[in-house]
Amino acid sequence: MNSVSQEGLADWAGPILSGALTTLEIALLAYAIGLLLGLLGAACRLSPWAPLRGLGTLYSTAVRAVPELLLIILLYYAGSQALTALANSLGFSGAVTINGFLTAVGVLAFVQGAYMTEVFRGAILAIPRGQLEAADAFGFSPWARFHRITLPALLPNALPGMSNLWLILIKDTALISVIGYSELFFTIQQAASSTRSHFLFYSAAGVLYLIMTLSSTALFRRLEQYVRRGQPTANSEEA
Amino acid sequence: MDFSWLNDPFYREYLVEGLINTLWLLGVSSVAGLLLAVLMAIVRIKGPRPLAWLAHGVSTVIRGTPLLVQLFFFYYGVGRLLEGLPLAQQGLFKDLLRDPFFYASLTFTLSVGAYTGEVLRGALLSVPLGEREAGRAFGLSPLQVFIHLWLPRAIQLCLPTLTGEMILLLKSVPLVSTIAMMDLLQAANIIRDETFLTYEPLLLIAALYLLLTVVLTLVLRQVERHFPGMKPQRSSWWRRQRPSVSRIS
């Protein structure tokens, strides 16, 4: 279209693919930490101790009521300032250049954890009470009860929500570009403005994200079949 | 914490403009989006094959890519292409095609249409066939059955999910600050640049969003309560309502 344009999709393929890889790394790490935060949050919300319950409720409610983009920007600055203060108090002077990758992972995991809390809370509440009581009656230790009974019983309930959250997370990684860390979408933006072929590069971004989300959907479907093994299949295709 | 900038009328004006734009965008795209959702849902169930496939494809692409990418795609990608057209040089189109609000509402409408269309499709499919047949037996035309019976019953079934989608829509509005539209976040960013404050404007916006979310939730609860067919409950005013009829799948 533009005769002066020297570089096209081919020149940017390398940076874009490595950006896609970074995006996947950020998403995977944030998801893993988010899962842990979610389990922790659900444990807090279901705890018999009121202050802990309040803390869990505050975390999941406040984080879910504020837009992700706003949270990401806020936490990015708060996180970098906290790290600088920490480094100063440890004797390093001046501002520390904080690691963009770790901040991105941390921020996304924090947000993800709040949503995951609700998914796990619902899934744990859906476990028939008798199963847990049976475990107690057989003298299971709390840990054995958790990973032998609670976890396998909550997974079929939690997996649809977890799969949704993973898809949301992949799409949320694009928000990281706003704080200037060079993941997939940031690279795309650079490519688009440098080559001036916006249409081409934003379409390419769409295709790449689509590949990621569609393949994840297929993977989660397999996973759900696995955790539902032995269950009657009649209600698996509901909704 | 320094909130003295709140006394500055200029900054207040930014914030008010941002708030108005935010609500305006929310209103336009939720109404247009719901209409599109109804269209997409019914086309996927009853429409001719090619149209159903098209709707399915659009819905998959929109739900599979980040909203931010779609926003950039329409504003920078499609927008630049359209600007080159001769039509775009004329008065009305010229202004419209440069306005970020136009692209933001277009993107958000498509997004609401795709996500809610999927919800609505499920709900339409779970309305028992017998109810539709009863409508036909009473002499309603297929269109009348759809408008007076099938659609209201489906909305009844998925109302809590629909209101949830509206809350999600509210929370995606700050994305439009990236295409230089004046929303609350953009107002906060301007204030931050001019006052050199990092947190205070952002915290104010976060509190405002918290408030907006709560208000919208309460308003939508009232809508759920008063939707025809919802069982009136004298329970506390904030509790979620359930459809009075059992769900048959």
Image (cartoon, coloured by chain):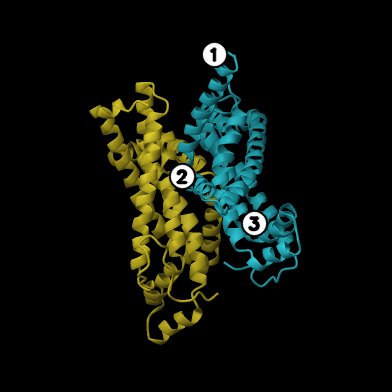
Chain colours: A cyan, B yellow
Q: Amino acid at mark 2?
A: Ala
Q: CA distance from mark 3 to mark 1?
A: 45 Å
> How many marks overall?
3
Q: CA distance from mark 1 to mark 2?
A: 33 Å
In the image, residue B232 lies at what x, y percent?
Answer: 36, 72
Along the polypeptide, which appears first: circle 1 or circle 2? 2
- Depth check: give the residue in front, A130 or B110: A130
- Depth check: give the residue in front, B104 or B219: B219
Q: CA distance from mark 2 to mark 3?
A: 24 Å
- Secondary element under disc 1, as helix, strand or loop, is loop
Residue A12 position (above or below residue B117)? above
Q: Is residue A96 visible?
A: no
Q: Are marks 2 and 3 on the same chain?
A: yes
Q: Chain of mark 3?
A: A
Along the polypeptide, which appears first: circle 2 or circle 3? 2
- Secondary element under disc 3, as helix, strand or loop, is helix
In the image, residue A93 lies at what x, y percent?
Answer: 56, 12
Q: Nearer the viewer, mark 2 or mark 3?
A: 2
Along the polypeptide, which appears first: circle 3 or circle 1? 1
The label shown at residue A122 is: none
